[in-house]
Image (cartoon, rainbow, N blue to C red):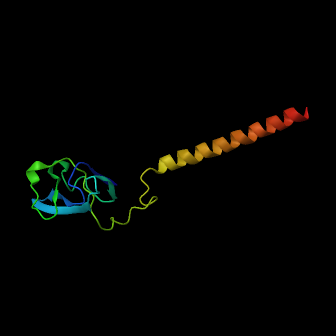
Amino acid sequence: MVELSAAKLEPTTKYTAYGLHDGARIPLLSFTTDTKGDKPQALAFMQFFGVYNPDTVSVSHSSSTPNMSQGRGVSPVPVGAPQTGGGSTAGRRYPTLIIVGLGLLLAAAATGIVGYRRRRSDLQA
């Protein structure tokens, strides 16, 4: 997830965040500031690291040409669908960790059963 936050810009103005990839300027996100000139939060899912350099990101009025030499360290938020195919269980990388977790669950269940039986036998005595 990538987050963009902006403050103290011109009120109700459309801005575009640009990134540099393989020498080309790529528009990553367009947003409009509120009446105070802020954009508290904009979120998106994308592959950013390894594709764009955060130092080359700039934000400018949508009608103006971006100056990539003045990157402002803004995290861009692109629009569009995220890449698919990486669900929560896709490509299990740590099967040993799954086995250890299941073992811990079984141990916790066994401990609970033993504790229950001891308590029950103490009440009957």
Counting from the top left corner in percent of width and height, residue 51 is at 21, 56
Q: Nearer the viewer, residue 2 or 107?
A: 2
Q: Nearer the viewer, residue 18 or 47?
A: 18
Which image quarter holds the C terminus? top right
Residue 87 sits above or below residue 53 on the image? below
On screen, residue 39 versus residue 92, left or right, reads left
Q: Residue at x 17, y 58 (%)?
A: 18
Counting from the top left corner in percent of width and height, residue 71 is at 14, 49
Q: Quadrant of residue 64?
A: bottom left
On screen, residue 117 versus residue 3, left or right, reads right
Q: Residue at x 75, y 38 (%)?
A: 114
Q: Residue at x 23, y 63 (%)?
A: 30
Q: Nearer the viewer, residue 27 or 110?
A: 27
Residue 89 sits above or below residue 115 on the image? below
Counting from the top left corner in percent of width and height, residue 12 is at 25, 60
Q: Nearer the viewer, residue 49 or 111?
A: 49
Residue 111 sits above or below residue 43 on the image? above
Counting from the top left corner in percent of width and height, residue 120 is at 84, 38
Outermost residue, right side: 125
On screen, residue 123 versus residue 7, left or right, reads right
Which image quarter holds the N terminus? bottom left
Q: Residue at x 25, y 49 (%)?
A: 7
Q: Quadrant of residue 16?
A: bottom left
